[in-house]
Image (spheres, rainbow, N blue to C red):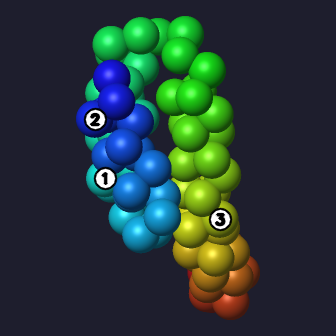
C-alpha cells in the first residue's frame, strides 16, 4: 500500500498524471476505501479536468469557426 501511495504522490508532485493514476488505482485495488487514496484520486481527477479544459475549449471554438454548409 505504501508503495502505491508513494507512486501516486510522486506522480502528482511531478505532474506526471499517468504515474499518479497508476499509483492511485493500484492503492484502491488493494484497499478500496483508503481515505488517502480517495483524496489523491480527487486531486488527480481535478488535474485531469484542468489539463483537458483548454483542449475542450479549443475544440469548441474550432467547431464554431468552421463553415456549416
* Of the pair 65 and 2, the residue shown nearer to us: 2
Density class for disc 3 (Cα within 10 Å; few <14, some 14-19, many ≥20) is few
Judged from the image, the secondary structure of the residue bearing numbered disc 1 is: helix
Report which residue position mark 3 lands on. Answer: 50
The answer to whether residue 24 is left or right of residue 22 is right
Which residue is denoted by mark 2 in the rendering? 3
Mark nearer the N terminus (2 vs 3): 2
Do callouts 2 and 3 mark residues in contact (Cβ within 8 Å)?
Answer: no
59 or 69: nearer the viewer: 59
In front: label 1 or label 3: 1
Does the image show residue 21? no
Residue at image position (41%, 69%) is 14
Please give the residue where the numbered disc 1 appears in the rendered image.
19
Q: Is mark 2 on a helix, strand or loop?
A: helix
- Tell me how far mark 1 sits from mark 3, CA to CA: 17 Å
Give the number of the mark in front: 2 or 3: 2
Left or right of 16 on screen, residue 55: right
> With respect to residue 64, does 53 lie above or below?
above
- Residue at image position (64%, 76%) is 54
- Identify the residue at horizontal 33%, vertical 15% (top origin): 29
Please tell me which of labels 1 and 3 falls first in the chain: 1
Q: Residues within 10 Å of mark 1 (few under 14, many from 20)?
A: some
- Residue 48 bears which disc, if any? none
- Asked where in the image residue 68 lies, by quadrant, the reply is bottom right
User: What is the C-alpha distance between the residues marked 2 and 3?
Assistant: 26 Å
Question: x and y percent of residue 31 in the render?
Answer: 41, 10
Q: Which residue lies furthest to the front in this view?
A: 2
Residue 27 picture location, percent across and down:
37, 25
Q: Residue at x 57, y 28 (%)?
A: 36
Secondary structure, mark 3, is: helix
Say which of 62 and 26 sits in front.
Answer: 26
Q: Which of marks 2 and 1 is in front?
A: 2
Amino acid at each position: 500500500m505504501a508503495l502505491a501511495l508513494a507512486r501516486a504522490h510522486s506522480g502528482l508532485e511531478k505532474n506526471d498524471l499517468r504515474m499518479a493514476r497508476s499509483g492511485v488505482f493500484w492503492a484502491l485495488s488493494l484497499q478500496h476505501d483508503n481515505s488517502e487514496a480517495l483524496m489523491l484520486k480527487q486531486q488527480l481527477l481535478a488535474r485531469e479536468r484542468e489539463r483537458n479544459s483548454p483542449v475542450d475549449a479549443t475544440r469548441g471554438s474550432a467547431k464554431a469557426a468552421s463553415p456549416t454548409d
